[in-house]
Image (cartoon, rainbow, N blue to C red):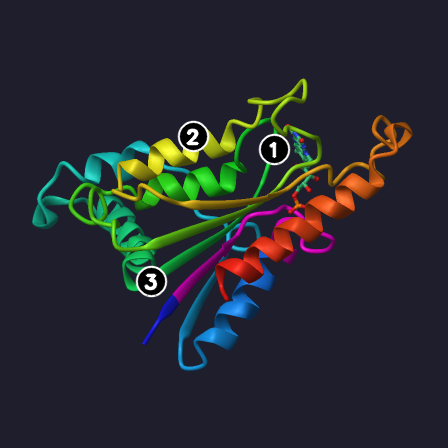
Amino acid sequence: MSHLLHLDSSLRTDGSRSRMLSAHYANRWRAKHPDGAVTYRDLTVDPVPHLDNVAVSAEFVAAADRTPAQAAARALAEKLAGEVLAADTVLIGLPLYNFGPPSTFKAWFDRIVIRDLTVGKLGDKEFVIVTARGGGYSPGTPREGWDHREPWLRHALTVLSVTEPVFINTELTLARESPAMAPLDLGSAEDKSLADALASIDRLVA
Ligand SMILES: Cc1cc2nc3c(=O)[nH]c(=O)nc-3n(C[C@H](O)[C@H](O)[C@H](O)COP(=O)(O)O)c2cc1C
């Protein structure tokens, strides 16, 4: 049975483009895998605690010698990593905040990178990251290369042996909303970016 792990991380539960894209992907995936299982985790509604020294130190102590706090941290890591290990496809809805990923997503990622559980072990999984960003960062634009979320995550995933994650982006989501961007008249470019992203998802899950 196929298994999809679906994560969202937009602060917004209404009007979010990354949630729209991830829901679109999940719907397509369900239609293609009617007997499949979906695990859903909302990192905004149910945030994972930031990594701390208790969790890090737990990895350097034998299971029998862990303090109760270290044992609890390890149990959380095993739960989160277990969801990834059980999945064939990991779908991530990822907005751009201050040129990087949401801190909620970073907190989740820091908890699932565990030497004996996931490091070097996820090469058989498909990672699909659907992203939204308010501005324009396409090749040839003044802000090309300012979106540090994708290069960071591509590098970070190689630690888990994930070498070909798929990124599907929509951008200019603030074209109409932002007073600074509205005069630039980029509404049709915003619409095209969203339509292109939805079409890319349809092709990917065809
Ligand atoms: C705290 C915060 C920081 C943001 N930083 C950026 C940014 O650095 N670059 C950008 O293009 N858009 C930025 N935005 C706009 C979001 O990327 C945009 O609204 C996007 O659509 C959010 O994803 P969502 O639609 O899934 O909520 C920011 C929004 C918030 C709330």
Q: Amino acid at mark 3?
A: Ala
Q: Amino acid at mark 1?
A: Tyr
| Residue depicted at x 34% and y 39% | 157
Alpha-carbon span between mark 1 and mark 3: 27 Å
Quickly name the residue at label 2.
Answer: 152
- Indicate the position of residue 43 as horizontal and vertical percent values: 51, 51
**Which quadrant of the figure shows ligand 1?**
top right
Quickly name the residue at label 1.
Answer: 97
Q: Residue 87 got which mark? A: 3
Instruction: For ligand 1, tell me if the residue under mark 3 lies within 8 Å.
Output: no
Q: Residue 21 got which mark? A: none
Earlier residue among tags 1 and 2: 1
Is 44 in front, or is 154? 154
Whether the residues at callouts 1 and 2 have beta carbons within 8 Å, the answer is no
> For the residue labelled by badge 3, is the local secondary structure a helix, a strand or a loop?
loop
How packed is label 1: few (under 14 Cα within 10 Å), some, or many (20 or more)?
some
| Residue depicted at x 31% and y 58% | 79
| Residue depicted at x 65% and y 37% | 133
* Figure check: 112 above or below 183: below
Instruction: For ligand 1, tell me if the residue under mark 1 lies within 8 Å.
Output: yes
Alpha-carbon span between mark 3 and mark 2: 22 Å
Quadrant of the rendered image containing residue 126 = bottom left
Q: Which residues are magenta?
A: 4-20
Alpha-carbon span between mark 1 and mark 2: 13 Å
Which of discs 1 and 3 lies nearer the camera? The answer is 3
- Indicate the position of residue 147 as horizontal and vertical percent values: 56, 28
Magenta span contains residue 206: no
In the picture, measured across the screen, residue 182 lies left or right of residue 168, that is: right
How packed is label 2: few (under 14 Cα within 10 Å), some, or many (20 or more)?
few
Magenta span contains residue 6: yes
Residue 35: tell me if it is visible. Answer: yes
> For the residue labelled by badge 1, is the local secondary structure a helix, a strand or a loop?
loop
